[in-house]
Amino acid sequence: MPEVETRDRVTAGAAAAFSVAPELAGDAFTRLSELQDVVGEMVRHAKVLGRQVPLGGGYADEVGRFMAEYGIGQRGSAVESLIAFGRELEDLKSRIAEAMEQYSDADGKAADDVECTGG
């Protein structure tokens, strides 16, 4: 058991020390925006599944109903899941933007504190 506790502390310390260069954060922000566009397209395609297509009776009818429910059903549908994923991406982008702003503010403050004399 002590080995697990030590590993957890090391992992937690490594996570706290994680940082990304500002230029990489900007690239991540751009790529997340691109991914959001793809997710939006997937939502549009999944909504098409929500249209129940009359495939006939019996098993074909069951398949048609399943596709409609999978596309836009209330719980666990493709659309619901993709929209939730899109919200997570937006939250991540907000956190990146906030971190970039804090970095910029700290960088500006540090630059103001530097005195260059005697050059």
Image (spheres, rainbow, N blue to C red):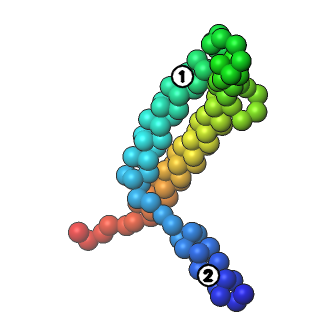
Residue 17 as seen in the image, left or right of residue 110: right
Three-letter code for the amino acid on which mark 2 is drawn: Arg
Circle 1 is placed at which residue position? 45
Residue drawn at (67%, 28%), measured in percent from left and top?
Answer: 70
Q: Residue at x 58, y 24 (%)?
A: 46
Q: Is residue 9 visible?
A: no
Query: Could you say which is closer to the camera, residue 69 or residue 106?
Result: 69
Q: Which disc number belongs to residue 60?
A: none
Residue 61 seen: yes
Q: Position of residue 104 (x, y in %)?
A: 46, 52
| Residue tagged 2 | 7
Indicate which disc, 1 or 2, sits on the residue closer to the N terminus: 2
In the picture, which quadrant includes the C terminus?
Answer: bottom left
Q: Quadrant of the N terminus?
A: bottom right
Proximity of marks 1 and 2: CB atoms separated by less than 8 Å: no
Question: Would residue 112 appear left or right of 96 to someone viewing this image?
Answer: left
Q: Nearer the viewer, residue 93 or 36?
A: 36
Q: Residue at x 67, y 83 (%)?
A: 4
Name the image quarter holding residue 48: top right
